[in-house]
Amino acid sequence: MSKLAIVTGATKGIGLAIATQLQKDGYMVYGTYVSSYSDQEIAVLETESFKLFQVDAKRMEACTDFIKKVDASEYQLEVLVNNAGVVRDQLLIRMSESEFDDVIETNLKGVFNMTQVCSKTLIRKKKGSIVNISSVVGLIGNSGQANYAASKAGVIGFSKSLAREFASRNVRVNCIAPGFIETAMTDSLSGTHIESIKNQIALGRLGKAEDIANAVSFLVSDKANYITGQTLNVCGGMVM
């Protein structure tokens, strides 16, 4: 039975890079997305080893329906990468309740939902690796991102707890905390802002989505089979 990896938020940016790398590593990849895409757009992204499913991880029912399809497939689930996330940046004094709730529900509760349904399969088979994509913002905070920082810090604590729970069942749980990565999000920043960010990074440059994908590839591999409960900062030395 071929091995399967699930990657949430897999249609662009870091998620797509992770899905692409895991295909190279020999996985069948099931990616999830929430935004509306046409059948033609989905067909362009999909390959023989990469299939996409519309799943809103904020909804437990949607995650439960999805894992039923996974368990009924010809593939054996071995890897879960919780990558999907949103930002709703705003200074706290101006932040609306919905801006806070949406980020927490997507970035933290979505990780809980997808992990809970997938972990039952991994625990039953006594083999697996879960990688949750956090952020350096969850470690150091950032002005205007109290909601995002809280959600990503929560993911780290969540992951450490699960690493302890799942270790006896041979399921490892780790985090990756990306720094500033070249994505559509950073493309919207001004040149002055980008230079200011680079000045905070020891290597003096932004990272690439492939840098995160390579870290995921390592953490889910047998080369990392004695690593669990850890947070790997992939940030060019922004956080030490």
Image (cartoon, rainbow, N blue to C red):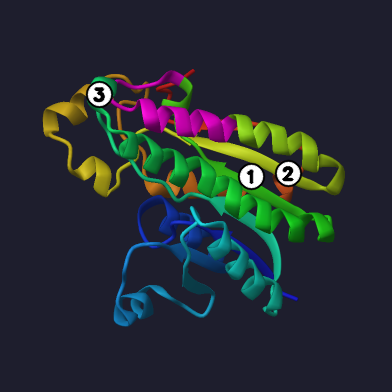
Which part of the image, by quadrant, shows the N terminus? bottom right
In reply to whether residue 55 is colored magenta, the answer given is no
Dot 3: few (<14), some (14–19), or many (≥20) neighbours within 10 Å? few
Dot 1: few (<14), some (14–19), or many (≥20) neighbours within 10 Å? many
Q: In the drawing, what numbered circle is on residue 172?
A: 2
The residues tagged by marks 1 and 3 sit, at their Cα atoms, a distance apart of 35 Å
Secondary element at tag 2: strand
> What's the amino acid at mark 2?
Arg
Q: Which residue is mark 3?
A: 91
Horizontal and vertical percent position of residue 153 = 51, 28
Horizontal and vertical percent position of residue 170 = 82, 48
Q: Which residue is mark 1?
A: 219
Q: In the drawing, what numbered circle is on residue 146?
A: none
The residues tagged by marks 3 and 2 sit, at their Cα atoms, a distance apart of 36 Å
Q: Is residue 189 left or right of residue 60?
A: left
**What segment is highlighted magenta in the picture?**
140-156
The residues tagged by marks 1 and 2 sit, at their Cα atoms, a distance apart of 9 Å
Q: Residue at x 49, y 61 (%)?
A: 19
Q: Residue at x 43, y 49 (%)?
A: 210
> What's the amino acid at mark 3?
Leu
Q: Is residue 53 left or right of residue 121?
A: left
